[in-house]
Image: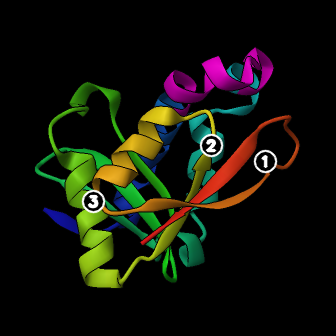
Amino acid sequence: MIRKAEPKDISRIAEILVFTKRIKYRSIFHNDDYSFNELQVVKVADEFNAPELLDKVWVYDDGIVKGMIHLEGKEIAELYVDYFFWKQGIGAKLVEFAKEKHGSRFLWTLEKNVDAIHFYETHGFKLNGKRQSEEGTPEYIVMLER
């Protein structure tokens, strides 16, 4: 079931974000200092203690929080599924929830994250030609919209 995130979910959300970002982004950014020193579960959990952020997050919970989606207006700001539960349709359920219940229309993802681009294209999003530098990195993000 997809439900609004609660304070009790913060550590699990942080865990999902940290480990998934390490798995997906380390090969793109090649920055071990960030991946293993800056990106820490406690630090990320502290960010989600802010009610104004937690209020924009939903989780996929079937007894275990397996994924999360962060929505900012009509934008999908973040969507992450715990690595151990990939390929089980959780990401699909989260993105469809965002589209149907919140009218999500667009998102940004790393240009080199071809798996994410393919995933979102499968769910009706298309690259629209917008591309910008990812702040503080040599990488680019691209916009997809529907």
Q: Residues within 10 Å of mark 1 (few under 14, many from 20)?
A: some
Is 49 rendered above or below residue 11? below
Report helix, strand or loop for mark 1: loop
Residue occupying the point 36% across, 67% down: 6
Q: Which residues are magenta?
A: 21-34
Which callout, 3 or 1, points at the residue further toward the start of the chain? 3
Q: Nearer the viewer, mark 3 or mark 2?
A: 2
**CA gap, disc 2 to disc 1?**
8 Å
Pick whichever of labels 2 and 1 is earlier in the sequence: 2
Q: Which residue is mark 1?
A: 134
Q: Where is residue 43 drawn, in percent x and y?
A: 66, 43
Label 3 with label 2: CB-CB less than 8 Å: no
Q: Is residue 52 above or below residue 42?
A: below
Read off the residue under disc 2: 110
Determine which of the numbered discs, if any, sits on residue 1 in the image. none
The kind of residue on which mark 2 rests is Leu
Proximity of marks 2 and 1: CB atoms separated by less than 8 Å: yes
Q: CA distance from mark 3 to mark 2?
A: 19 Å
Asked if residue 126 lies left or right of residue 63, the reply is right
Q: Is residue 25 above or below residue 64?
A: above
User: Quick one: SS at disc 3?
Assistant: helix
Residue 78 drawn at (x, y percent): 50, 56
Q: Which amino acid does the dot numbered 3 rest on?
A: Leu
Report the residue at 57% width, 63% height from top: 49
- The percent coordinates of residue 59 (x first, y second) are 30, 59
Q: Which mark is residue 94?
A: 3
Q: Tell me the CA gap for discs 3 and 1.
A: 24 Å
Name the quarter where the N terminus is drawn. Answer: bottom left
Specify whether residue 117 is in view: yes
The mark lying in front, picked from 3 and 1, is 1
Amino acid type indicated by mark 1: Glu
* Image-based side of 31 in relation to 61, left or right: right
